Image (cartoon, rainbow, N blue to C red):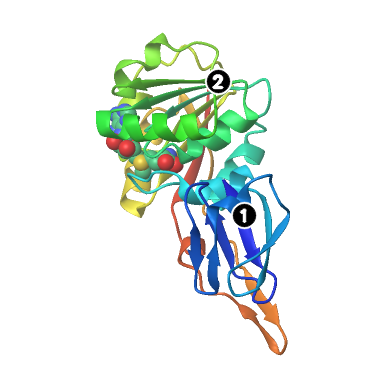
């Protein structure tokens, strides 16, 4: 996969690596990509810069099923819990595998559960695209498997009903380890906090928050925040500690 940037307009595209490449500015023929050139002229003599797509570029091309988590939220989850190269993450639901891809990139091992078979297939395709080999992916309801998991550093729950998982005896999550629940609606937060209050001997509520990222456009005399849907409200993050 290649990133192609027009030198004149700075329009940016992803070339999947097959066939002639058509843009509004003309055509780059498949043969012109042979030999990994760093720049080519299209059929209208416009120069284009070419480089290998980085993982962040490829993310735009992953297969999507359910709504994916955004980098702004993932960045905070990872830094807030100090998750790193020695960590084991257990997560559900896998969804489209976006969180899985980021987690796999920084953690030692990721165990992902997804209740829907069709979503599991999407996640597997996306893992294959990124050549990831430290993820164990399983179709199933996490609440039926959580008691089998051992030595968990972070339990990440991006699913509508996290309580049935938290009701289980999570012996694999030792005292002080993190749970992060990702929930889009305040009524879900209410239900979760009611549960934590009733189970205050088992869980400590550390933080409820949302993250905000505001991108700016600054070009010539334009200098203003950009309107971008994916930077609006996404979900609440609830950080719990196992007691
Ligand atoms: C919003 S999606 C997760 C998105 C994912 N984090 C991503 O970034 O691509 C929620 C997923 O949870 C799955 N799910 C719901 N309940 C579950 C359960 N009890 N165990 C496992 N997966 C579950 C759903 O099928 C759905 O695919």
Task: Tell me if 22 is positioned left or right of 122 in this view.
Answer: right
> Picture coordinates of residue 106 (x, y %)?
64, 31
Q: Is mark 1 within 8 Å of ligand 1?
A: no
Circle 1 residue: 32
Badge 2, how many Cα within 10 Å: few under 14, some, many 20+?
some
Compared with 48, 187 (above or below) is: above
Q: Earlier in the sequence, mark 1 or mark 2?
A: 1
> Picture coordinates of residue 67 (x, y %)?
37, 49
Residue 94 lies in quadrant: top left
Displayed-image quarter of ligand 1: top left
> Picture coordinates of residue 19 (x, y %)?
47, 51
Q: Secondary structure at mark 2?
A: loop
Residue at the (52%, 62%) spot, across then down: 231
* Residue 162 in view of the camera: no
> Picture coordinates of residue 108 (x, y %)?
62, 21
State the quadrant of the N terminus.
top right
Residue pushed farthest bottom?
A: 221
* Residue 59 in view of the camera: yes
Residue at the (61%, 67%) spot, across then down: 42
Badge 1, how many Cα within 10 Å: few under 14, some, many 20+?
some
Front residue of 50/108: it is 50
Which mark's residue is nearer the viewer, 1 or 2?
1
Residue at the (48%, 31%) spot, across then down: 127
Task: Tell me if 35 is positioned left or right of 89 in this view.
Answer: right
Front residue of 46/209: it is 46
Q: CA distance from mark 1 to mark 2?
A: 36 Å
Compared with 177, 238 (above or below) is: below
Front residue of 155/96: it is 96
Front residue of 66/29: it is 29
Residue 196 lies in quadrant: top left
Residue at the (58%, 41%) spot, across then down: 77
Disc assigned to residue 134: 2
């Amino acid at each position: 996969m290649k990133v192609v940037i027009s030198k004149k307009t700075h329009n940016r595209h992803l070339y999947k690596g097959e066939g002639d490449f058509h843009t509004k500015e003309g055509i780059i023929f498949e043969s012109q990509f042979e030999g990994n050139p760093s720049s080519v002229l299209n059929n209208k003599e416009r120069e284009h810069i070419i480089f290998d797509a980085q993982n962040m570029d490829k993310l735009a091309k992953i297969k999507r099923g359910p709504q994916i988590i955004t980098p702004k939220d993932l960045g905070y989850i990872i830094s807030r819990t100090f998750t790193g190269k020695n960590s084991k993450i257990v997560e559900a639901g896998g969804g489209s595998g976006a969180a899985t891809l980021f987690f796999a990139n920084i953690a030692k091992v990721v165990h992902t559960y997804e209740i829907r078979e069709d979503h599991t297939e999407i996640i597997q395709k996306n893992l294959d695209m990124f050549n990831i080999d430290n993820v164990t992916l399983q179709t199933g309801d996490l609440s039926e498997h959580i008691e089998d998991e051992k030595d968990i550093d972070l339990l990440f729950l991006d699913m509508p009903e996290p309580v049935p998982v938290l009701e289980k005896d999570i012996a694999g999550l030792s005292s002080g380890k993190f749970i992060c629940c990702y929930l889009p609606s305040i009524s879900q937060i209410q239900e979760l906090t009611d549960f934590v209050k009733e189970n205050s001997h088992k869980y400590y509520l550390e933080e409820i928050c949302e993250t905000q990222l505001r991108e700016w456009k600054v070009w010539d005399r334009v200098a203003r925040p950009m309107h971008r849907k994916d930077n609006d409200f996404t979900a609440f993050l609830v950080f719990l500690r196992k007691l």
